[in-house]
Image (cartoon, rainbow, N blue to C red):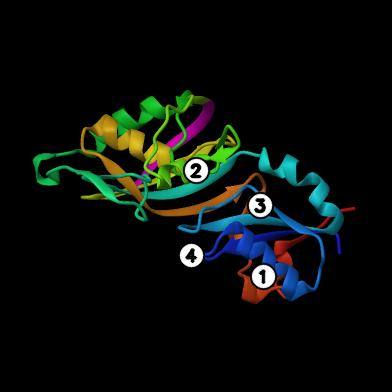
Amino acid sequence: MNIIINLNKDYGITSHDAVTAIKKLLKVRKAGHAGTLDPIATGVLLICLNEATKISSLLSNIDKEYIMTAKLGESTDTYDAEGKVIKKFQISNFKFQIEEIKEIIQRFTGEIEQAPPMYSAIKVSGEPLYKLARKGIEIERKPRKVIIDSIEILSFKSPFLKLRVSCSKGTYMRSLCNDIGNALGAGAHMVELVRTRIGQFSIENSAKIGELPHKTASLYPVD
């Protein structure tokens, strides 16, 4: 059973939790995921079984697509809805038009530099940033180059802005949300994130844990 599973991860569980559940369900001893999703995020998570784990790093490098919903008017310490609100804006003071928002978000397409959030698993001197953040310690993060292929506005009903984003590996959607909020002058944090695609693996062909192993369209054998 050397297989890549195109899993539609549920809200509220970690990527590690998803791997553990699949190992137990399918009774396999070796499994791993390619491209972590935070508990707040749902959608495509690739789970590699047995010998397929050897290509997990290659799968992690593939471009991705997300649908992200941002709430304007509030910035949080984690850049998402699980964090503490650290700044509020009077959203009624902002009379945004779609064309104005479109012009601003296009500044974030192409190759950009992005600072990772403090609440991330990146390690500094062997300690994950999120552990430092929980201690109230904030350190300077070196910006990383990422590529945003496209950003499309799907809807805007104040204060919620829904975007479709195609991007390279290593892109932090929470950071992108925070940066867009700052550029708009209104602050923002991410309230919903769905990963809709990793390369050729789309959410349309994914399966929930409870649908496995019967939803065969989500299973990709590896020779």
Residue extending furthest toward the front: 135
Q: Is 147 one of the magenta-colored residues?
A: yes
Q: State the CA–CA distance, disc 1 to disc 4.
A: 14 Å
Could you tell which of marks 3 and 1 lies nearer the N-terminus? 1
Q: Which residues are magenta?
A: 145-154
Q: State the CA–CA distance, disc 4 to disc 2.
A: 17 Å
Q: Amino acid at mark 4?
A: Gly
Relative height, residue 197 to residue 186 (above, below): below
Q: Could you say which disc has been placed on residue 201 in the image?
A: 3
User: Is the N terminus in the top left, top right, bottom left or bottom right quadrant?
Assistant: bottom right
The kind of secondary structure the magenta stretch mainly shows is strand
Relative height, residue 171 to residue 163 (above, below): above
At a point 53% along the width and 29% down the height, the residue shown is 147
User: Disc 1 marks which residue?
Assistant: 21
Query: At which x and y percent is residue 98?
Result: 25, 39
Nearer to us of marks 4 and 3 is 4
User: Disc 4 marks which residue?
Assistant: 12
At a point 34% along the width and 38% down the height, the residue shown is 178
Q: Amino acid at mark 1?
A: Ala
Q: Amino acid at mark 2?
A: Ser
Query: At which x and y percent is residue 11?
Result: 48, 64
At a point 73% along the width and 75% down the height, the residue shown is 25
Q: Tag 2: Cα neighbours inside 10 Å, few (<14), some, or many (≥20)? A: some
